[in-house]
Image (cartoon, rainbow, N blue to C red):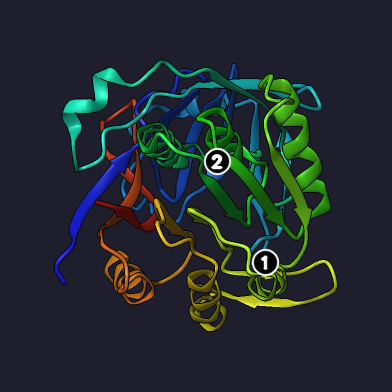
Amino acid sequence: MQHTFTLLEAKNWRDYELLDSGDGLKLERFGKYIFARPESQAMWSRALSRREWDSADAVFQPTAEESGGHWVEKKKLPESWEMKYSLTPSPSPKERGEFDALPPMRELAFSVMTTPGRHLGVFPEVAAHWDFIVEMIQKAKRPIKVLNLFGYTGLASLAAAAAGAQVTHVDASKKSVTWARENQALSGLGDKPIRWIVEDAVKYMQREEKRGVKYDGIILDPPKFGRGPKGEVWEVYKSLPNLFEICRACLSDNPLFVIPTLYAVRASAIHVAQALDEMMKKYKGEVDCGELVTREKSANRLLSQAVYARWYSK
């Protein structure tokens, strides 16, 4: 099957900017603070001057270990600060004419902070998926149950809940789930039906399959490598096919979407799309795929952050 390949941008940010990139680094604004982080994909020269780069509030200094390193603060930063994102339903490749008729959405509010793993609690490029999820749920005009596996700080879960879905959020990190619950309160979504689960994703899904629990939408943002709360090992190439199989068993008879996104792996989006085709072969729908990209403010170059595929119902 041929697939539509798209460079997918999150274009609705106000609190985030990719200011510049190059020489294996990226310069970004999160709220009112500026950070320099390693970025292996930035294989060109920086467009901004050294003075502008030197104005960063903090720089991440990596070590030899794959995720090792520490932040060097040039200015005193708060322990955390708040960012916002205005959810806007994003037209899918189908029925774009209905886009203008969709009701307006609320802002997501969430806290960010520097962490030992060079991240700050949000992957801004994934906001393109949040808008797509909102659009699909609103157009469905029926009760929707969404599962968010490897849900991190909960922003995709909050987008789905804000659009009217019943959400189950699963992450092996208790700290991430606590952070996600705090983001729920910040966003004013405390009354929305979200179940927060601290658990290994595969083990949780195996139990859901036995219980006969079904979902209409599944979001998967698996890490390249990770460990569950009881030491369970996750390696994406070995573990993802099995997880796809279990997820298929937990899909409803009328699913709405399935969206896997992969970071830091040597895999083509086409490969992810073909695996998704196999998973969804008994359902009527479409698959598109591509890369999540961020556009620089400085030189208008696109920086690829992840590969994705998404199946959605016709």
Q: Which mark is residue 42?
A: none
Percent from the top left, x then y, of residue 308?
37, 57
Q: Residues within 10 Å of mark 1 (few under 14, many from 20)?
A: many
Q: Residues within 10 Å of mark 2 (few under 14, many from 20)?
A: many
Element type at mark 2:
helix
Residue to which mark 1 is pinned: 201
In depth, the one of 294 and 237 nearer the eye is 237
In depth, the one of 177 and 82 nearer the eye is 177
Relative horizontal placement of residue 218, taking residue 71 as reference (left or right) = left
Q: Amino acid at mark 1?
A: Ala
Percent from the top left, x then y, of residue 83?
61, 21
In depth, the one of 14 and 257 nearer the eye is 257
Q: CA distance from mark 2 to mark 1?
A: 16 Å
The image shows residue 1, relative to residue 287, as above or below, that is: below
Q: Which residue is at 58% across, 53% downward?
A: 147
Q: Amino acid at mark 2?
A: Ala
Q: Which residue is at 73% across, 67% downward?
A: 200
Tag count in the figure?
Answer: 2
Q: Which mark is residue 156?
A: 2
Can the viewer see residue 190? Answer: yes
Q: Quadrant of the N terminus?
A: bottom left
Can the viewer see residue 118? Answer: no
The image shows residue 239, relative to residue 208, as above or below, that is: below
